Amino acid sequence: MSASGGKVSLFNMMTFKVMTTFMSPPPEATFLAFHPQDNNIIAIGMEDSTIQIYNVRVDEVKTKLKGHQNRITGLAFSQTLNSLVSSGADAQLCVWSIDGWDKKKSKFIQDPAGRQSPLAGETKVQFHNDQTHLLVVHESQIAIYDSKLECLRFWSPKEVLNAPISSAIYSCDGSLVYAGFCDGAVAVFDSDNLRLRCRIAPSAYIPSLPVSGSNGAAYAVVIAAHPSEVNQIALGMSDGAVHVVEPSQDNGSQNPSSSSNPSLTGKQPRVS
């Protein structure tokens, strides 16, 4: 399933042909997610801040969820919690029951600087493999929330990793969090405590640094974790390139804040 400013398209992955298109803009679809128990049901986040629950089989919007104040930037289902979590450019999280689609809870993410006014900017969400803990990603922070939307762990850019966060994701086994930054750096954290394990400088995996982005360097706008190799990720870059990187993961004794090496252990990551 895909969308890029126009209709949503549903593809057959055996033939790679378009099976159907639906939901003509406006508003545009900004995020898509399949229901975990019924492939005919799709949650579609919209530019107008609503979430439309669409049934492909009968070509019908079953319900429209309202609770955000800006476009939808993330959707994540949990079968264990029987819930859909949504996030938006209003830096708000909402939890919806997938039985009756009623809103169970909502919360604005906290400002690292301690200001009371709500944050702005895209917020992304991903459930851990346990389907209970939630990774929340904003340019100002990465955080782990529980099923009641209580923030358990929190990390914000500082020291050698002081650029805004561009993307973050769990590793395939949920033990690590990979994060990209707008200056091209990539970091690896332990997911249980968000302790920094490894920092990769952009020069370690980008052959040349083309002019792209606010600081002149390409950076990862999206990260994908390998489905079976814990230490391997793909970085989708702002200049259109894709780098497959395998960071060094052995624990070194160097202080991450003072290390100028691509990784804490001083080893170059494998890049392809």
Image (spheres, rainbow, N blue to C red):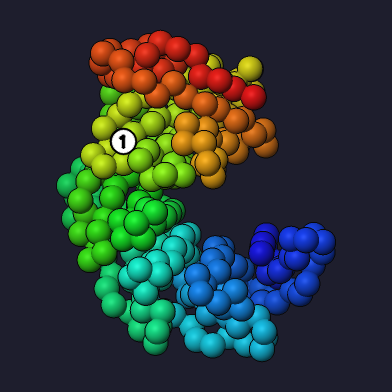
The residue shown at (57%, 36%) is 234
What is the crowding at mark 1: few (fewer than 14 residues within 10 Å), some, or many (at least 20)?
A: some
- Give the amino acid at mark 1: Asp
**Residue 119, image quadrant:** bottom left
Q: Dot 1 lies on which element?
A: strand
Direction from residue 84 to residue 41 in the image, left or right: right
Given residues 145 and 207, the one toward you in this image is 145
The residue shown at (46%, 60%) is 74
Rendered view: 213 above or below 60: above
**Residue 266, image quadrant:** top left
Direction from residue 20 to residue 65 in the image, left or right: left
Residue 12 image position (x, y, % from top left) = 75, 65
Given residues 180 and 80, the one toward you in this image is 80
Q: Could you tell me if residue 151 is visible in this image? A: yes
Residue 42 image position (x, y, % from top left) = 57, 74
Residue holding disc 1: 190
Q: Could you tell me if residue 156 is visible in this image? A: no
Quadrant into which the N terminus falls:
bottom right
Residue reaching furthest front? 228
Residue 127 image position (x, y, % from top left) = 39, 57
**Residue 27, image quadrant:** bottom right
Residue 92 image position (x, y, % from top left) = 33, 63
